[in-house]
Amino acid sequence: MKLNINGLELIGAYGRQTNMQDWRAGKDFRIVGGPYCSRRDVKEMQKEGFQMLEFTLNGELLERIILDETLQAICENHAGTFARS
């Protein structure tokens, strides 16, 4: 099964290291190759068709948040099957 997933890669903003505590606190992050954002922007990201957020630090995946309920169910049913490409 090949999935076409529309996602965004996020890193810490303003020189901060990426960490999920900052995301939960509503602090800004930088979309790689794009503008700044925060958790306040998630509904707009979903409206624009983004299904997933990947938080990275030095190119390494820290955490993945699935925004799409259908995709979330697929990932839960196939845990460990999908690798970051």
Image (cartoon, rainbow, N blue to C red):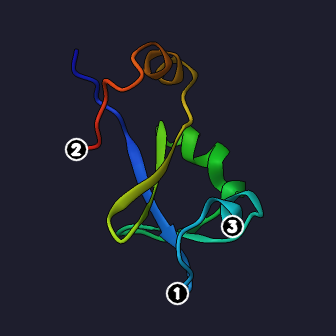
Please give left or right for residue 17 compared with residue 9 in the image.
Answer: right
- The amino acid sitting under disc 2 is Ser
Residues 56 and 13: in front is: 56
The residue pinned by badge 1 equals 15
Q: Nearer the viewer, residue 60 or 30?
A: 60
Q: Position of residue 76 (x, y in %)?
A: 50, 19
Name the quadrant of the C terminus.
top left
In the image, residue 11 sits, relative to residue 16, either above or below, namely: above
In the rendered image, residue 3, in percent from the top left (x then y), is placed at 28, 24
- The amino acid sitting under disc 1 is Gly
**Which residue occupies 47% across, 68% down?**
11
**Residue 69, image quadrant:** top right
Going from the N terminus, do you reach mark 2 or mark 1 first? Answer: 1
Q: Nearer the viewer, residue 81 or 72?
A: 81
Residue under pointer 3: 22
Q: Nearer the viewer, residue 57 or 42?
A: 57
Q: What residue is shown at x 63% (from left), y 59% (from top)?
A: 20
In the rendered image, residue 58, in percent from the top left (x then y), is placed at: 35, 71
Between the residue at mark 2 and the residue at mark 1, the CA separation in whole angstroms equals: 26 Å
**Which residue corresponds to mark 2?**
85
In primary-sequence order, the first of circles 3 and 2 is 3
Q: Is residue 12 positioned above or below 9 on the image?
A: below
Residue farthest to the right, as pictured:
25
